[in-house]
Amino acid sequence: MIDLYSANTFNGQRVSIMLEEVGLDYSVHRVNLAKGEQRQPEFLRLNPSGRIPVLVDHDSGNSDPFILTQSVAILQYLAEKTGHLLPASLTERAKVYEWMHFYAVDIGSVIFSAFYLQHLCSDKQPQAAEELRNRVHDLYRYFDQQLAEQEFLAGSSYSIADITALPAALTQEQKLTDYQNLTRWLKQLKLRPAVQRGMLIPEGE
Ligand SMILES: N[C@@H](CCC(=O)N[C@@H](CS)C(=O)NCC(=O)O)C(=O)O
């Protein structure tokens, strides 16, 4: 059995899409970020950095429940645990990791920095936030080029690289229409039942 502590954000949705794709049994615990539940002592015992998502695997083979944070590491763990959504060959897997890191580091962290500058920091800097959002938009060009040559981000198979990129790109869909291949990929992936379910988990936020 798996416990997922999550909220309706890109990082949380990655993991819920993955759990829906691989079909493992799991329970969802919604963490209300607006109410600061991520800073409560019981949550900090799971993740001292006070952030979702957190996965607790009671069937890892270890004697204690196995606690894992960082959405991309969780996707990798679940792919290895189940044998799904990660290619068998070393070089094909390496391409999956290349696109996962491109997205999570170069795009995901910049999206967060823009949000921080616009909404969270005490001296708000909307112009700097806008520049970062433009940078993100430019970086999507490389995803578009990649998807012109192959069906999925890291090759001919759907993988955890696609799941890493999907939630944030889906919410930006209307702004990405000049990227035709990315748009084709988004339309294709949002038809997947596991993606549709995962994007709505946890309910209520
Ligand atoms: N790199 C981490 C980022 C986790 C993260 O920033 N989570 C956010 C929600 S998307 C959070 O819990 N923020 C709460 C806070 O900072 O108080 C991951 O991929 O899991």
Image (cartoon, grey):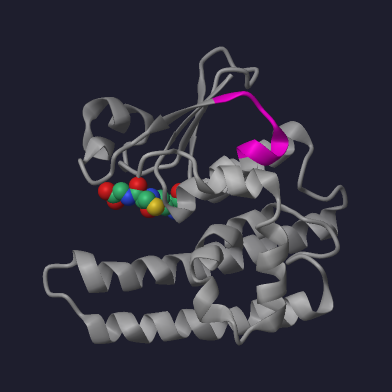
> Is 9 located above or below residue 202 in the figure?
below
Q: Which residue is found at the position 83% from the left and 78% from the top? A: 149
Q: Position of residue 4 (x, y in %)?
A: 48, 31
Answer with left or right where residue 45 lies relative to residue 90.
Answer: left
Residue name at image x 65 percent, y 57 percent: 190
Along the line of sight, the residue nearer the viewer: 35 or 122:
35
Reply above or below: 118 against 45. below
The image quarter containing residue 140 is bottom right
In front of the other: 76 or 175? 175
Question: Dividing the picture into quarters, in which one does residue 148 lie?
Answer: bottom right
Q: Position of residue 168 (x, y in %)?
A: 50, 63
**Residue 91 in which image quadrant:** bottom right
Which residue in the rendered view is the most extreme toward the top?
Answer: 63
Residue 37: give x, y in percent of width and height: 25, 36
Q: Which residues are magenta?
A: 19-26
Magenta span contains residue 120:
no
